[in-house]
Every structure is written in structure tokens, then in C-alpha cells.
Amino acid sequence: MKLEEFFPYRLAIAAEAFSRNLQDVYAREFGLSREEWRLMSILDGVGRISSLDIARRTTLDKVQVSRAAARLEAKGLIARHIPDSDRRLREYECTATGRALYLKARSKVNARAQAMLDAMPTAKREALEQGVNSLIETLELDIETRQDPSAPR
């Protein structure tokens, strides 16, 4: 079998290309790395969250979370807290500045994502969404979804 015919490879290539296209927006316009963007996305709407929960909800490992959090904290976009119950744990939340930047970036990223999806015929886009949702369910992935009207459909 040729690598180009191997479904996991094709899925990874498509996901990476889609992600890179979005990265062009949040990196170029807002100075955020992929890891920083993912961390900010997790923090959006959850208040304070631990580094362990962030790692569980993303593809980032604990070291990537820690490094991205340190950069975001240095930029004044998030605040770090050490809970009294476990001094080894770190908890993070967006600052007002971080929230404002993220909301502005999110609308532009969502617009770019929607433009890419809108380039597909409606039936194929719906089939893709159903297929991805089915794969997520089959693999029993713990992905929290939000009903956000500005998110791409």
C-alpha cells in the first residue's frame, strides 16, 4: 500500500493543513504559537483550570502546557495560581487583556475556518462533520464541545 492511500496518513495531512491555515491568523496577526492558541482556547469560558486538565483536554503534554503557559504569562495574557491543596499543581486563567485578545483572534480564526469549510459542497461538509463526530465517538475521545454561535459549523 502506498502511504498516500493510508487513511490515518491522509487524515493527519488534511488536519495539519487545516490547522496551518488557521495558524496563519493567530500567529501572524496575534503573535500566538499553536500551543499558546490551544491553551487560550481551553481557558476560554472555563475560568480557572489546572495544567493536568489542560493536558487532558488537548493534544499537549504537561511540558508543552507549562512552556506555553509561561510565555502567555510573560505576555500578560494569563495568570498562574498555585492552589493551597496541592503546591505541585498549577492553575491558569485568562487576564482581562488575554480574554480581549483571544476574543478578537477567535472571531478571525473562526471566519478563516468557516471560509475553508464553505468552500466544500454542503453535503460533503455535512458528511465530513458526521464522519469526524463518529470517529471521535468510536475512539471514545473526551472532547468537550461548546455551543458557540460564532464557531464554525
Image (cartoon, grey):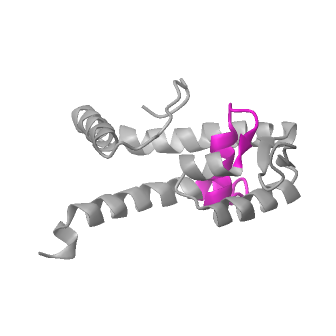
* Residue positioned 69% across, 40% down in the render: 43
In the figure, is residue 153 to the left or right of 104?
left
Residue 133, image x and y in percent? 32, 37
Residue 18, image x and y in percent? 43, 55
Q: Where, quadrant-wise, is the N terminus in this rendering? A: bottom left
Q: Is residue 40 magenta?
A: yes
In the figure, is residue 26 to the left or right of 20?
right
Quadrant of residue 67 within the rendered picture: bottom right
* Residue positioned 77% across, 37% down in the render: 99
Residue 62, image x and y in percent? 64, 61
Q: Which residues are magenta?
A: 24-50
Furthest-bottom residue in view?
2
Q: Nearer the viewer, residue 117 or 57?
A: 57
* Residue positioned 51% across, 24% down in the render: 147
Furthest-front residue in view?
85
Residue 42, image x and y in percent? 63, 42
* Residue positioned 54% across, 39% down in the render: 110
Q: Nearer the viewer, residue 77 or 46?
A: 46
Q: Nearer the viewer, residue 68 or 139?
A: 139
- How many numbered discs? 0
In the figure, is residue 89 to the left or right of 153?
right
Q: Is residue 98 magenta?
A: no
